[in-house]
Amino acid sequence: MNVVVLGCGFGGVEVARTLRKQAKELDINMIDHTPQFDYPPAYPELLSGKVTPEAISHDLKKFATKIGAGFIQAKVVNIDFKAKKVKTEATSGDEGRDIPYDFLVIAIGAEQTFFGIPGAEKLSYTVNTMKGAIETKNALDTLDYSKESSIAVIGAGLTGIEVAGELVDYFKDRGALARISLVEMMPRILPALPKEKVATYVSKFLSDSGVEILTETAVQEVSEGEITFKDGKKLPYDIIIWTAGIKPNSLFEILDIPKVKGWLKVDSYLRAEGMDDVFAVGDTVYFEREGVRAGQNVEEAEGQGRVAAENIIRTIKGEKLKRYRPKNTIQNPKALISLGDGKAVMYFGGMVFKVFAYRLKKFVEHRYMKRF
Ligand SMILES: Cc1cc2nc3c(=O)[nH]c(=O)nc-3n(C[C@H](O)[C@H](O)[C@H](O)COP(=O)(O)OP(=O)(O)OC[C@H]3O[C@@H](n4cnc5c(N)ncnc54)[C@H](O)[C@@H]3O)c2cc1C
């Protein structure tokens, strides 16, 4: 039996690891268009230089070899679910391949969205990929420090908060002046976390560090050097870092597979609805049962990866499949948010914990990277 794992982020890596632990004889092939696993929760710290790209990346071929799997570096451009083949992109010297599978796991994550706002995609930097974070850091490094810089961070979700905190450290380390504006269209920062007290704490922390927080402020248009908001106000900028919103992977637009609002629709066992041989995990899926919806985060990607792998093995053995139960949900989210200056805050069970939160975040990162 041949299992193809498409996408080698948190979900895909966990699928491959679990499959190998439980089935020594299985043929496993991992596919990703990047050659390395990158650790997204640490991307904001690339900006301040607290981490280097090398420290938060690992070679996927080496990892695959270690667990006795194959690794193919290629971008997948289509999937033929009837013929059970994955199609990779043609490049110079390679006309693209058809890779057959008995079981397929789709784990290709999500993409940044700019909500179609004029100028936003063209003129913004991002941190949602390693490449994007490195480009953002390079842009910061080429600013003219003889004058005050204006940096606009769009979106005050988890990533926007972390980016703002790292920017404070970046400019402090250089003794340079910057106006750092954190822009959020909702009435408060961290709108995805139900309890307001975490937002109040983080808001005060960032304001005390000099970050200007603009809530109920929606971007209408971005032009060279200036952002226009829906209320007509304008903000001059040197750099925009866009962190607001994700959308389904663009590959799904051409796939003939059940979806909910563009995300993959899965059954209780994480199979693509109506398919026995295709599973989906992580940021790609829309999973909701009895009013509880899985969040799009590391804990979910890994938890789903483990259950999908187990269910593939159970299917092969003809055993009853295991239901997936989400743990880090939209209704009851958990988060570890770094704030810069070696501080972080943990949100867990509606409570806010500050002591040791940063150390815990770094411990989680260190422990994760050790598996490679
Ligand atoms: C800056 C940032 C900070 C974050 N911080 C946290 C945090 O602190 N805690 C937390 O829980 N979550 C955090 N997240 C979210 C978390 O990273 C995601 O929920 C998680 O990565 C989802 O895992 P995944 O396996 O579904 O997808 P991903 O980890 O995104 O992996 C998808 C993989 O698929 C590959 N791929 C995509 N398209 C193709 C294609 N067509 N062909 C081949 N390969 C493809 C990609 O290269 C990638 O390796 C953060 C995200 C970002 C961007």
Image (tube, rainbow, N blue to C red):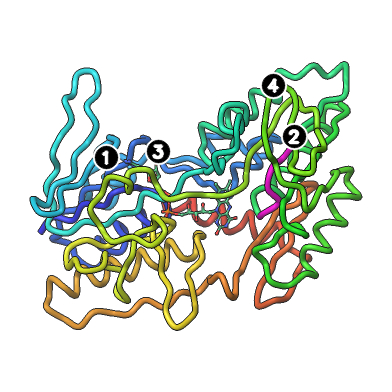
Query: 67 above or below 236?
Result: below
Q: Which residue is drawn at the image coordinates 21% and 48% (left, top)?
A: 29
Would you say the residues marked 1 and 2 are in contact, meaning their CB atoms lie under 8 Å apart? no
Q: How far is the residue under mark 1 from the one under mark 2?
A: 37 Å
For label 3, being within 8 Å of ligand 1 is answered no
Instruction: From the image, tell me which residue sits under label 1.
Output: 76
- Residue 36 is marked as 3
Q: Secondary structure at mark 2?
A: strand
Q: Amino acid at mark 1?
A: Val
Q: Secondary structure at mark 4?
A: loop
Q: How far is the residue under mark 4 from the one under mark 2?
A: 11 Å
The quadrant of the rendering that contains the N terminus is: bottom left
Would you say the residues marked 2 and 3 are in contact, meaning their CB atoms lie under 8 Å apart? no
Instruction: From the image, tell me which residue sits under label 2.
Output: 228
Q: Position of residue 36 (x, y in %)?
A: 40, 38
Which of label 4 and label 2 is nearer to you? 2
Residue span colored magenta: 152-157
Q: Nearer the viewer, residue 302 or 151?
A: 151
Instruction: From the image, tell me which residue sits under label 4.
Output: 224
Does residue 130 show up? yes
Q: Which residue is drawn at the image coordinates 73% and 72% (left, top)?
A: 195
Which circle's residue, 4 or 1, is located before the other in the chain? 1
Q: Position of residue 289 (x, y in %)?
A: 42, 79
Q: Amino acid at mark 3?
A: Gln
